[in-house]
Amino acid sequence: MKASDLRNWIDSLTQDIDFLYNGKSGSICPISRTDISLCYDGYAVDVQSVDAAMSVPFINGKSLNGLCEQLDI
């Protein structure tokens, strides 16, 4: 999935998004555009924007922008 497509999906606020990366699970939970929870392999972080959700390095030190095409969604 392209980064722009994932960003639009998060921004739609329609559902939580589960993914796998390197055999470990993660999730993106867009509660609102200013409250998004990101989890991967036991690590969790909350961000206050969709852009932050795409750029915060929460997956083994990498961001959704850098890994989105490698995620199994």
Image (cartoon, rainbow, N blue to C red):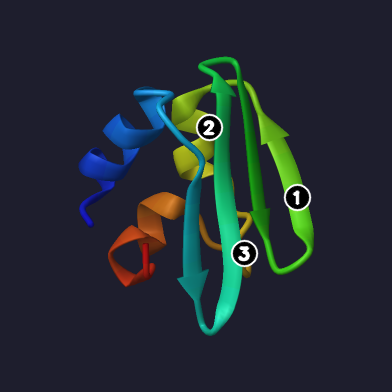
Q: Is residue 45 left or right of residue 69?
A: right
Q: Is residue 33 left or right of residue 47?
A: left
* Separation of residues labelled 1 and 2 (CA atoms): 14 Å
Q: Amino acid at mark 3?
A: Gly
- Around disc 3, counting alpha carbons within 10 Å, would you say few (fewer than 14), some (14 to 19), or many (20 or more)? few
Residue 17 is situated, as x and y percent measured from the top left of the image, at 47, 47
Mark whose residue sits in front, 1 or 2: 1
Q: Which mark is residue 52?
A: 2
Depth check, front residue: 16 or 50: 16
- The answer to which quarter of the image holds residue 37 is top right
Mark 3 vs mark 1, foreground winner is 1
Give percent across and percent down for residue 14.
Answer: 40, 27
Which numbered dot is residue 10? Answer: none
Pinpoint residue 38: horizontal percent, then vertical percent: 63, 45
10 or 65: nearer the eye? 10
Mark 3 and mark 2 lie on one chain; the one further toward the N terminus is 2
Disc number placed over residue 61 in the picture, else none: 3
- Image quadrant holding the C terminus, namely bottom left
Q: Crowdedness of circle 1 by 10 Å Cα count: few (<14), some, many (20+)? A: some
**SS for callout 2:** helix
Taking the spot 59% from the left edge, 15% from the top edge, the residue there is: 34
Q: Amino acid at mark 2?
A: Ala
The three-letter amino acid code for the residue at tag 1 is Ala
Residue 72 sits in which quadrant? bottom left
Residue matched to label 1: 44
User: Which is more N-terminal, label 1 or label 3?
Assistant: 1
What element does badge 1 sit on?
A: strand
> Real-space Cα distance between discs 3 and 1?
13 Å
